[in-house]
Amino acid sequence: MITDLRLQRFRSFRDASFELSPGVNIVVGPNASGKTNLLEALLVLARGSSYRARDTELIRFNEPWARLDGHSQAGGQRTVKLRREPETDKTFEIDDKPFKRLSRQHTWPAVLFEPNHLQMLSGSPERRRDYLDDLLEQIQPGYGPVRRQYRRALAQRNNLLKQPRTTPEQLFPWDVRLSQLGGQIARARHDLVEQINKELPALYKQLSQAKTKVAAVYDNRWPIGSYESSLLKRLETGRDDDRLRGFTGAGPHREDLLVTFDGRPSQEVASRGEVRTAVLALKIIELQLLQAARDQAPLLLLDDVFSELDGARRHALTDHLAPYQTFITTTDADIVLKHFTKTANILPVGSITP
């Protein structure tokens, strides 16, 4: 848990300090006042990077540097420094020890829900693949390197496919490498989705107060038990087709996470409210998986989450927030406050400082 936060020259903030509650913190202010920037600062402090901008964009306009400082409940101190010139540079200090980047062991687990996440179920399969892969990087040691190695091998094979004189012998080592790494990725995703699906139907029912049965399925092309050999065979037999299209047409980079409502894909039947509730359910499961993997309660960052939920759904959601330090942005604190006790901490954010 973070006990306090100071933002200097970060985004819309010139110099602002906040005392934080270990429970619910309500970030309230008008539109364009910096509420989302405050959540972004917490995420940068926890994970080391923004979810929506490059490092140089985090520095306040026309300022040469930015800085974030925070303390944890256990007494630790953390600083993030950003510098614009002579080139964009980011450094970290943890208990006065410098780091150029945060390893997994130095990050704080955090879960974010923001409006663009609603596109996860209705948007491209890439969004859903990234959701699974980003979560796996946080909960499964070693998954990040496998993911990066697969991307490099895929780029190398695709580059060879675009060259007119590439031989099967040149492609074969990359076929083998892709099938080996692809099997690891597909198996990890499949197992993760099985974990998610153990909780999703009941949790969605609690949040929605509806009888709709929601399920998650990993849409893998081949059986998980024989994935490597099946993918290798497909890469070998599909080389001519891959040459024509100029890229590799099979593998975990082409697979999908399906979320179904009464057996039908969410893209076909789910309303906006149903999608929002399903994504919230996925985020709560993400919290639980992170806490189990890291043995530490994650931060929960909810950007404008209450605006489209009715009273029953808001009440059902709050029941799941108690174990976590939570930050909720809103333009109307009263809407949020009536679902919590008076111990909720109000963090007013004013208009952007000129």
Image: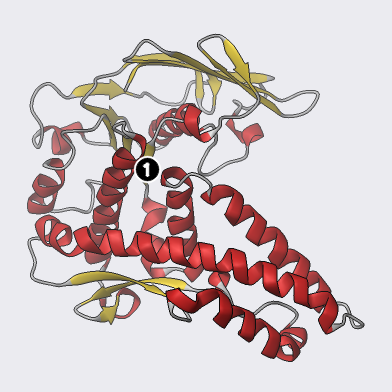
Up/down of 96 relative to 173, above or below:
above
| Residue 302 visible in the snapshot | no
Where, quadrant-wise, is the N terminus in this rendering?
A: top left
- Left or right placement of residue 185 versus residue 162 in this view: left
Residue at 15% over, 34% down: 322
**x, y percentage for residue 40?**
45, 34
Report the number of discs: 1
**x, y percentage for residue 58?**
58, 31
- Left or right placement of residue 78 versus residue 247 in this view: left
Q: Which residue matches tag 1?
A: 112
Residue at 37% over, 51% down: 115
**x, y percentage for residue 203?**
16, 57
**x, y percentage for residue 31?**
37, 38
Report the coloring of the rendering: secondary structure
Up/down of 36 relative to 199, above or below:
above
| Residue 161 visible in the snapshot | yes
- Left or right placement of residue 88 versus residue 348 in this view: right
Residue at 13% over, 32% down: 337
Identify which residue, 83 or 240, lies in the foreground. Answer: 240
